[in-house]
Amino acid sequence: MKLELRGITKRFGSLVANDRIDLTVAPGEIHALLGENGAGKSTLMNVLYGLYQADEGEILLDDAVQYFRGPGDAMAAGIGMVHQHFMLIPVFTVAENVMLGHESTKALGVLDLAAARAHVRAVADRFGFDIDPDAMVGDLPVGVQQRVEIIKALSRDAKVLVFDEPTAVLTPQETDELMAIMRQLRDEGTSIVFITHKLREVREVADRITVIRLGAVVGEASPSATNTELASLMVGRAVELTVHKQPPRLGEGGLEVRGLRVLTPGGVVIVDDINFDVRPGEVLAIAGVQGNGQTELVEAIVGLATRVEGSIRLGGTELVGKGVRGILDEGVGFVPEDRTQDGLVGGFSVAENLILDRSSDPAFVRLGTINRSALDAFARDRIEEYDIRTRGPETPAGTLSGGNQQKVVIARELSRDLRLLVAAQPTRGVDVGSIEFIHKRIIETRDAGVPVIVVSTELDEVTALADRIAVMYRGTIVGVVPGDTPRDILGLMMAGASDPEVAA
């Protein structure tokens, strides 16, 4: 099916999110839509999917003009969408999520769950997915949840499929599998719009590339274009894709983790006998396939884990047992892996989010009352310093693009006096311009003599930032290696090889 957007314009008050955008996607083509977070990519796709109504312009499918009053109309016309933030109900099973809105029934209106299960299995088998139709979605890893989203779209016989930042929560292995799925769909005639900011993926899978900046199309590019050319087109300036850092100047003390174990409330060991140090002035990256205990390790360090054994000492102070508030007060900065769930309060303003962990700071709060002028001045300074794209301090944080939400979290955590920074997936779902900025800030923090832990499933990020790399596999650290260790060795260690010499 041929998709054509002509002159699409979408305004939110005085903000022009899409400015007369033209886009054509041929049948059996993967068309990548590149741009910074906040450039208008997702808004454009939400117009296509019927979630927003365009103020100007028209949508055509096979040269016929379409009028979508909502997602139901778009789906009926053959358009499917896999959202960056999953549209799934955690307490429903996979089969129940897939059939939601398109329920099949038996006699007396009873839901035909057997048919839904069979349909899930058929689509899953077609693409080699290993998914239990009766599994509760909330219990599934994020990579598997995304496959449920794909099954939902394909189960409705989508002829045009939109992937909105589909690899933001995937491991490298899962990303490769998704690329193969996209190629298979393309070869079967499905038109695909691939929204992303990851240049490596665009060059690997796209047939054509359209670049959007500040709500308008600024050019098209070939997948043969260099990363530097694509990045410059995206952000409108030269972008430095290499992280520059001097050799670490190590201080004394820092973080010491000894014999650390993390258990579930039921007593299952998730992290077992972890030992490592992080010296002031260095970045220790924790690498590994997602789900191997990295999340629980971070939760133990910042006081979020409920059952922790062993010792975590920062500058000689024991953190185990202190609780989150006590650990933050010890000077620990925390960038969580899921900014929407754990990093921000979407309904609060940007200014309020910037002091979430400083609610008792007399600089902003006295006798239980917020000093609005002080807060506003502080927020405006951080907005300028961290280049947060927002209409002002009072803008709800939940309305910002993903990259700008992440900048709010980074600005909040780095605006305090820190003795340790823990950054989990610091650039997940963030565009190339924001990645450059965040990496620079992390290195500046390291160079200021703060020990830094970076947890990332992105090997490019791990090798760019790390002075040393600890690789986790099934809840243990299988080895600690230098930051310049080759990707292939790291990949083997992530699969369980404990000796990097053997892995080589």
Image (cartoon, rainbow, N blue to C red):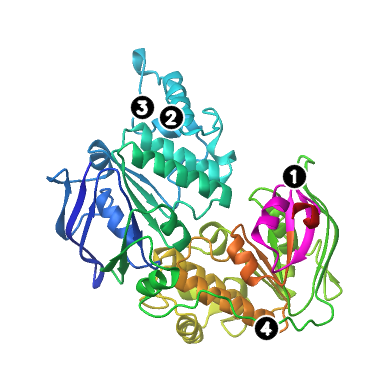
Element type at mark 2: helix
Q: Amino acid at mark 3?
A: Glu
On the image, which quarter does residue 358 sit in? Answer: bottom right
Task: Please name whichever residue, 459 or 169, is drawn nearer the observer in this view of the structure.
Answer: 459
Reply yes or no: does residue 353 show up in magenta: no
Q: Which residue is mark 1?
A: 264
**Real-space Cα separation, disc 2 to disc 1, in angstroms:** 34 Å
Give the mark toward the camera: 1 or 4: 4
Q: Amino acid at mark 1?
A: Thr
Give the mark toward the camera: 4 or 2: 4
Between discs 1 and 4, the one toward the N terminus: 4
Element type at mark 1: loop
Question: Considering only vertical position in the picture, is 444 above or below 438?
Answer: below
Mark identifier at residue 446: none
Give the mark toward the camera: 2 or 1: 2
Mark identifier at residue 103: 3
Q: Which residue is mark 4?
A: 246
- Left or right position of 382 against 194: right
Q: Is residue 198 visible?
A: no
Numbered range of the magenta stretch: 471-499
Between discs 3 and 2, the one toward the N terminus: 3
**Real-space Cα separation, disc 3 to disc 1, in angstroms:** 36 Å
